[in-house]
Image (spheres, grey):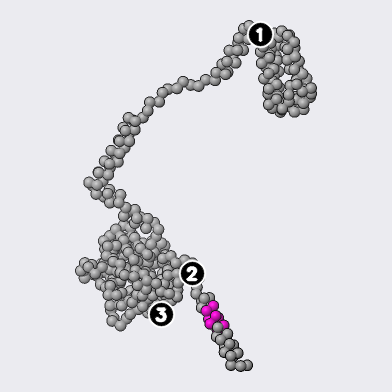
Amino acid sequence: MDKNSKILVFSLIGLLILLFAFLLERREVPVIKNWDEKYRYELEDPYDTSAFREALEYSYGKENIKPYRIVDSLASHSKALYINIGYDIYLNEQKSNELLEFIKKGNSALLISNVVSSSDELLDDSYDYMYDKSDSLDQIIFLDTDSLIFNFKYYYRNTKKAVSRSRNFFLDEMEEDSTYMSLANVDTLSIFQKRDIGQGALYRYTIPYHFTNLVSLQDDFRLFYNHVFERFDAEHIIIDRPRLADRIESTANNSPIKYILAQPSLKWAYYLTILLALLYILFKGKRRQKIIPVQNKNENTSLEYVDTLSQLFLAQKQNVKLIDHLEDQFYHKVQKRYFIDKNNSNFIDLLNRKSKIEKVEIEKITDSFNQASKGYAFTDDQLHRLFNNLNQLYTKWK
């Protein structure tokens, strides 16, 4: 084998190795369908928190982890930690009061969310946040030690390439209060704070992404998790997440109508505007309404004509003319119903087969018509009998 052949063979082998490595790398990329930020404890999608729950169960024991929905009352617990994680959290009045009583008794609450809204100002921090510029890397520095730094990258729809993303931080100009304590920063801005309430404490963390399944695969997650939870002296964990009903209530509570109705002057102005609009529609509509003339009831004049004509013939003893009308009506109905012409030589046989009427009955009627055409004078009784025979035939034919 000459030198050129050897170079060609080695080149082909190298190309096959590169192709195999490329295909192997493509197979290693997981196919992920759901990238929604739901933070559900029971699912394993990137932005869910099943790994976080498993870590809690390992640390505190599976039997000591309870979902909030099965807990009768938070106030009945002691040495417990309440955790709520979600994109945004809204605490209604009942839940806010229950959570405050829970904390004041010496328990702790950890709210992990971009924004927390509550009916109580001690829990509400929806106006305490700011957005920082986007970045693909979070470097978390815990303030209780200078050397403890964790790095988490952002991924979305691609687990191989980090992407930039904006983050929430607590405002620098938050009120100076000794009950507040900043515990961790990102880029010198606070993301983790503690506030003493009664005998317990409220903890707030502004980036829920740091507790997702996607972050749990990164190198620093285990040490980060341990350092966050080593500060909690809890025997029981109550896990919760935002409910759809809470979000709907939050949207309703922030509506312009609620604000208007909450202000006495605006409320009366709103009601007065509606009243004036209704009065305008009522009176303006009446003034522009056109007069609708009363129409007489429509009457069937054709029936009145037939009745008048029949009475006239009877009064003039012209029964033959009435029979002429009955004859025309009879042959017209037969033609329309059975398509039999009156001039057909087999008229009676055809009508008998199609209508299932006896020939004798048909012949009685046709004989009466023939006698009338020859000038035979019919009495009133004979006319009445012919009329009844026709009605019976119309009733019985198929």
Q: Earlier in the sequence, mark 1 or mark 3?
A: 3
Q: Earlier in the sequence, mark 1 or mark 2?
A: 2
Of tags 2 and 3, the one toward the viewer is 2
Q: Is residue 146 a member of the stretch shown in magenta?
A: no
Whether residue 278 appears in this view of the structure is: yes
Give the Cα separation between the discs numbered 1 and 3: 117 Å
Residue 159 occupies quadrant: bottom left
* Residue in view at x 34 percent, y 70 percent: 134
The three-letter amino acid code for the residue at tag 1 is Gln
Figure check: 64 above or below 247: below
Q: Is residue 21 a member of the stretch shown in magenta?
A: yes
Whether residue 82 appears in this view of the structure is: no
x, y percent for residue 353: 77, 27
Q: Residues within 10 Å of mark 3 (few under 14, many from 20)?
A: few
- Please give left or right for residue 62 compared with residue 392 in the image: left
Residue found at the very far top of the displayed protein: 316
* Residue in view at x 42 percent, y 70 percent: 156
- Please give left or right for residue 189 compared with residue 332 in the image: left
Which residues are drawn in magenta? 16-23
Residue 339 occupies quadrant: top right
Q: Secondary structure at mark 2?
A: loop
Give the Cα separation between the discs numbered 2 and 3: 21 Å
Residue 11 occupies quadrant: bottom right
Give the Cα separation between the discs numbered 1 and 2: 98 Å
- Please give left or right for residue 355 compared with residue 123 in the image: right
Which residue has dot 3 on it?
A: 219
